[in-house]
Amino acid sequence: MNTYEELPKTYSPSEFEDRIYEKWCEKGYFTPDVKDNRPAFSVVIPPPNVTGQLHMGHALDETLQDILVRYKRMQGYNTLWVPGTDHAGIATQIKVEERLRVEEELTRYDLGRDKFLERVWAWKDKYENRISGQLKKLGSSCDWSRQRFTMDEGCSRAVREVFVNLYDKGLIYRGHRIINWCPSCLTALSDAEVEYKDQPGFFWHIKYPIKGEDGYVEVATTRPETMFGDTAVAVNPDDENTKHLIGKTLILPIVGREIPVIADDYVEIGFGTGCVKITPAHDPNDFLVGQRHNLEQIKVMNDDATMNSYAGKYEGLDRYECRRQLVSELEQKGFLVKKVPHDHNVGVCYRCGTTVEPLTSDQWFVRMKPLAEPAIKAVEDGSIKFIPERFSKNYFNWMNNILDWCISRQLWWGHRIPAFYCQSCGEMTVSKEDITVCPKCGGKVEQDSDVLDTWFSSALWPFETLGWPDDTEELRKYYPTSVLVTGYDIITFWVSRMIFSGLEHMGQKPFSTVFIHGLVRDAQGRKMSKSLGNGIDPLEIIKQYGADALRFALASGNSPGNDMRFSDEKIEAARNFANKLWNASRFVRMNLTVESVELPSSEKLALEDKWIIDKFNRLAANVTGALDKFEIGVALAQIYDFTWDIFCDWYIELVKPRLNDKDSDRGRICQNVLAYVLIGTLKLLHPFMPFITEEIYQSLPHEAGDPESIMISSYPEYSETCCFEQESEQFSRVIDAIKAIRTRRSEMNVPPSRKSKVFIQTKYRSSFSDNCYPFFVSMASASQVLVADEFSPDEVSADNAVQIITDSASIYLPLADIIDFEKEKARLETEKKKLLSEIDRLEKKLQNQGFVSKAPASVVQGEKAKLARYAENLDGVNSALEKLN
RNA sequence: GGAGGCAUAGCUCAGUUGGUUAGAGUACAUGCUUGACAUGCAUGGGGUCGAUGAUUCGAGUUCAUCUGUCUCCACCA
C-alpha cells in the first residue's frame, strides 16, 4: 500500500475495491478513539431491516452518510459512524412465517414460541451478515467494532429502562381502546402503520324500524356486517329533520335488539341520511361517541375477521362473506332501501396489505401529548434543523395532531413487554428485570405475551447505540449526534419518535440536523417495488460498474429532499467519469519522474500553472462551501467539471509540450503542479468516490506530510498563497483565443492538418507571452504565432486573413484559399446585429437612473465594463466588414 | 378536507442570499486512427425557464391566482 506502481491500463474497479476496503479495516481507520479530544462528528445509521437485502434507497442513504462522514473525518473531526440493523418486528416475522409455510408447510404455532424465535434469530444472523457485506461493498466507512442490533442485549436493556421509566411517570398505560387490527398478521397496528387505499364500494341504506311506530330510520353504511355491534343511532341535536327522533328506540333489523337514538355533534348535518349507526367496538369515531354516551361495546368479530356469536347464524363466516349474505337477507326482508356505489378509503396493513379492522382491544399506549410538546419546541426554536427546511412542516403537522401511540403488538418477534401478571392475586408488576414471583403476594407471575412496536426500540437508536442506559464515554463524546440522514418517508415513523425520546430520556436532542433525501425511482420515474419487478440491485451495479460509479450516480444531481431517477445513462456517465479520472491519472503517473511532490514557489510557476492552481483553490472553497450546506450534488458537479473540463481538457493538454522535457526545470515544475493538483482533486473527490481515489493516491508520490492513506489525509482548503486571480484572468485570455480559433476553423471546415499562421492583435501583450505560443501550435493548429499591439495592413490584409474578434484580441488567420467571402460577411453581419442589440440593451440599462442609483456599485461597474468591451468588439467587427467590402 | 413537492434544451436534471447573453449529462449534427482515455477529442444546433398578474432599477429565482402532475396527513358514517 505504500510503494507506488504504474496503474493498470484499464479501469477495473472489481480488482481493487475489496482489497482497499480490507486494508482500511485492518488499519482501523473507521474506529475513532473516544478519548481523542478533537471535536466530534457522529452519525448513527438508519438501521436497515433484517428482512432482506439492501436496495437502491439504502444505497443512496449510505452513500450520502459516507460522503459526510469521510468529509468530516478528513477535516480532522473525531468521527464516528455507528452501523447496525433493525429487527423489524412484523416485517421479519412475516418473512420467516412465509418461508416456514412454503418450505415446511408449518405455521409458527406448530413450532411454538421458542422454536419459532430460534428460526427468526437464524434468519436475522444471515441477513445481518448480508447487509453488512453490502455496506462494505459500497465503501461505507462505519465503525464495525460498534455495530449494533435493535434487539441485542444493550438495546434490550435500553428498551426496558425506557418502558419502566415512562410507566412510572404515567406516560405508558394499558387500556381498552379501539385500535387498528390486522386480521392476517393478527396484531394491533399503530396509526402510522396503516396505509389508506381507494377502493370501490357501496353505501348500503338500511331501514331501522322505530319501536312502537310504523316508521323507520334510514342509515347508510359501508360495512353492513358491523350492524350486529350497533348500540345506538346518532343524529345531530341541531338537525331539524331528525330532532324528533331523539330519545326514541329502534329495533335492529334481523337481530331484533333495541337501540336508542342519541344526539351527538359528531353527526354532520346534511350529509347522507343524517342518521348514523353507532358501532363503538368497530369504528374509531363511534368508539368516542360510545364513550360520551356510555354505550355498550359489542365486538362482533374474532381476531381473524370471522364473525362471532353476536352475528347469530353468520357466526364463523368471514367478514366479507357475512356482508354478502347479510345484505341479501336484508334485501329479501325489505330492510334494504338502496345500494349506492361509493369509493372509499380503506385502511390496509403496511406490511401485508390486508384491510385492517378497527376493533376494541386491551393494548399498551404511550401518552403522547406531554412528550410531543418539547419535541415540537426543539424544531421550532431551531435546535433541530430539517434540511430542506420544508420537511419541518411535515413534522409539525404530525406532532401537533398526535394521538396516543399503540405500542403493543401481538407478535412473537420483538421486545417482550416487561409487564408481569400474578396468577394468584392478579396484580400487574412492571419491572426492568425478569421476575418469577409476585412482589405483592409471592404468587407465580407470567409475562405479558405481547411485544413492543419495532419503532419503540428504533426511537432510542441514537443513544442506545452509544451505551445508554450506562453512562459511557461514547455517550459523552458523541451524543447528541451531528446529523441524521434519512428519507422523507419515515419522518413520522422514526425521526419524530427519536426526537421526543432523546429529549425525554437524555434531556438532550438526539441530533442537530435532519438531512432528508428523496426516493430512488426507476428510469420511468416509478417507485421501485417488488411487485413491479423494477428494482435495481445495488450489488449488480457494483459488480458491473464499481461502487464508485454507483456512488457517483446516486450523489450527482441529487438535491436534498427530491426524488431521483436511476437509469443506465446515469450509471454509464458515472463510470465514464471514473474512467476519465483513471486515465488522466495514469497519464500523470507515466510522466512523473519526481520522487516527492512540492508546490513550487510562485516565481517559478508558469502562467498556466498559476491558472490551474488558482482554479483548484477556488474549487476547494466551493466544494467545502457546498458540502457544509449539504449541497452534495452541487459539490460533486464542481469537482466533475474541474476534473474533466479544466484539468484534463485544458491543463494536461497545455503541459504536454513541457513534459517532453520532463527533467528540465520547467518540466519538473510542471510535474509538481500536475501531481499537486491531481492529488488535491483526489482528496476533494475521496468522500464521493473512495476506492478509485485511494487506488490512484497509492500510485503517486506525495507531498511531505501526506499520510499513507488518502482517507486520513487532510481535506483541501482555500489558501491565500494559492490565489492567483490576476494571472488566472490573464491566462483565460489565451484560452479564449484558442477556443475562438478552433471555433472559426471548425465553422470553415479547415482540417486540423492545415496549419496556419496566427496573428494576435491585442492590448494585453503580457497575457500572450512567448511561453504560450506552443499552446497555439498544439491546440489551435498554428504554424507560427505573432503578437502585436497593432499589425500593419500589409501583414493582415483583407484578402488573406480571417478575422476573429474576442474580448481581448483581434485574431487573424491567413487562410485566403479557404475563405468563403459571402459566408464570412453574413457571419460578421449576424455578429454585428447581436452586438448592437446587446449594446442597446446595456445603454438603456445604464441610462436608467433607478438602476444606476439603486444597484450595487459592483454590478453597475460590471455592466459598464461589459458595454465598453462590446463597443470594442463592434469596432473590430466593423473594420473586418469594411475590409471585406 | 388539510399540507407540501414538481413544471427550465428532444430526454434526465442542476441553477446556493434576486444582478453577465440561463447551465450540465445524454441524445442529435459535423470533423478528428491527437502516444492517458472512442468509456475519448474538437465544434455546433436546440430553451419567450407551465400561464396570468404583483413587488423591484432588475425575477428562472420573491409573492398571489390559475393549469397540469406527484406525494404526505386526516377521513365522512
Image (cartoon, rainbow, N blue to C red):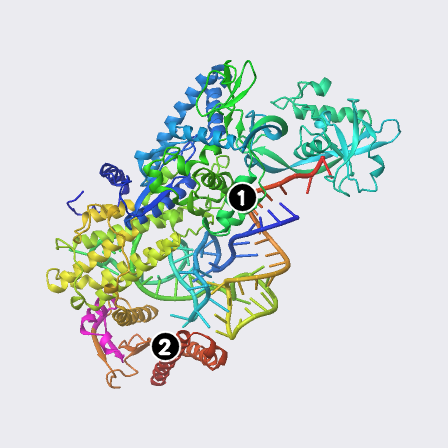
Foreground residue, A234 or A132? A234
Question: Which chain is disc 1 placed on?
Answer: A
- The percent position of residue A107, horizontal first and vertical second, equals 50, 18
- The percent position of residue A638, horizontal first and vertical second, equals 34, 57
User: Does residue A227 appear left or right of residue B52 in this picture?
Assistant: right
Checking the image for residue A535, the label placed there is: none
Foreground residue, A337 or A582? A337
- The percent position of residue A409, horizontal first and vertical second, equals 53, 27
Q: Which amino acid type is marked by label 1?
A: Glu
A789 falls in the magenta region: no
Range of the magenta residues? A755-783
- The percent position of residue A133, horizontal first and vertical second, equals 33, 34
A765 falls in the magenta region: yes
Provide the secondary structure element on which disc 1 rests.
helix
Q: Can you identify the residue that label 2 sits on? A: A824
Specify few, some or many for label 2: CA neighbours under 10 Å numbering under 14, 14-19, or 20 or more: some
Q: Can you identify the residue that label 1 sits on? A: A373
Residue B58 vs A351, above or below: the answer is: below
Q: Quadrant of residue A197?
A: top right
User: Which quadrant holds the C terminus of chain A?
Assistant: bottom left
Q: Which amino acid type is marked by label 2?
A: Glu
Q: CA distance from mark 2 to mark 1?
A: 74 Å
User: Which quadrant holds the N terminus of chain A?
Assistant: top left
Residue A241 vs A663, above or below: the answer is: above
User: Does residue A252 appear left or right of residue A703 in this picture?
Assistant: right
Asked if residue A406 can be seen in this view, the reply is yes
Name which of mark 2 and mark 1 comes first in the sequence.
1
